[in-house]
Amino acid sequence: MTAEALDTDNARTGAARPTCAPSNGVPSLRDFVEIVWRNLKLLLIAPALAGLAAFVVTSVTPKWYTSVAYLTLDEPGARSADVIMRSSPVLDAVSRAVGDSEQASDALRDALDRNRRIVVAPGNVEGAAKLFRLEYSDRDPRRAQKINDAFISAWIDAEKPPSDAPSKVNADIGRIQLRLHSVSEVLDDLLNRVQAAVDANQKNQNQQNQNEVAVKVRDLILANHLDFADVVAVLRKMRGVSRAVVFSEPSLPQEPSWPKRAIVSILAAFAAGLIAVIFVLLRASRRIATTA
């Protein structure tokens, strides 16, 4: 019986045309098209409902706003600022500035610290960044801006040199001078070993001198890095931190940073559509395998 005759007989008897079920049990492209067409409503309604539900949920979910300030700091300066901003004196000063309490509770300190972070600014390379983002998030955009500004002010106040800074600086300078003297001795010994390596005639002795010179160079580089860090720390103690490090003052956020209704709705619709497709294909594959 031909396909046309079968269609005519089905139309007369009311029987539906059977779905193609290949003998090897593998659905063909035509089978997939028919499966999608028969379940088109489900494949369209499921993503639409999921996206609508996500949009409604994110609309009633409390929104968070993030105030952003940019600070011109190097990596050590950013780490130092982050540590100081986590300290209890700074958190208490921020709490007083925003009018919460004279002395913040542990829960309030945790909330202030949890909602603040310092990250590398976009466009800067991790490890060599010179610009950082100070962010603070809150449900009130004006409060987020106010707290972010309070963190900067409290941090700068904490970095001010104490009254006994000169004596401490003098002690640090004396320690650096001793280390520089040691570096000078290393340089003198290094020059002597280089001269000995040049004048050496025996290969083994020359190789030994080269190894010793390499060790001395490594020690010299490490000592130089330590001295440079100490000099930076001494200068910071003497001068402190000024408001000049603030490249951009804390912003007043206009749009919520979380939740993103559009992104969440699209992701929910995509996930629901993917689940619907998998469900339809599995159900159809089971039916084809049963009838094969």
Image (spheres, helix red, strand yellow):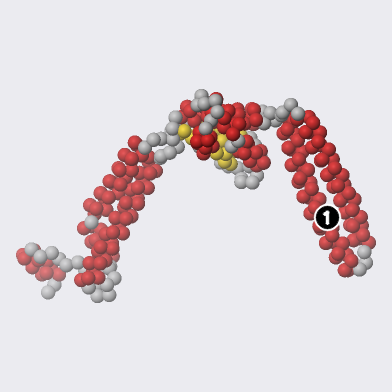
Q: Quadrant of the N terminus?
A: bottom left
Query: Could you tell me which residue is drawn at 93 percent across and 67 percent down?
Result: 201
Q: Secondary structure at mark 1?
A: helix
Quadrant where the image shows the C terminus: bottom left
Residue drawn where x is 60% and y is 35% of the image: 87
Vertical position of residue 111 compared to residue 93: above or below: below
* Left or right: where 140 falls relative to 226: left
Q: Please report the residue visible at 80 percent of the width from the left and 52 percent of the height from the top.
A: 219
Residue 22 position (above or below residue 199): below
Q: Amino acid at mark 1?
A: Lys
Residue 246 placement: quadrant: top right
Q: Picture quarter containing residue 180?
A: top right
Viewer-proximal residue, 91 or 251? Answer: 91
- Answer with left or right where residue 73 lies relative to residue 103: right
> Seen in the image, is 177 located left or right of residue 234?
right
Q: Position of residue 220 (x, y in %)?
A: 81, 50
Q: In the image as oriented, which residue stretches furthest toward the left?
A: 12
Residue 244 visible at all: no
Q: Position of residue 208 (x, y in %)?
A: 86, 64
Closest to the observer, 137 or 251: 137
What crowding class fits label 1: few (fewer than 14 Cα within 10 Å), some (14-19), or many (20 or more)? some
Give how far across and how far down residue 228 sits, in percent.
76, 42
Residue 261 visible in the displayed image: yes
In percent of the image, x 74 and y 38: which residue is there? 232
Q: Total marks drawn?
A: 1
The residue wearing badge 1 is 216
Q: Nearer the viewer, residue 148 or 164?
A: 164
Picture layout, residue 67 above or below residue 201? above
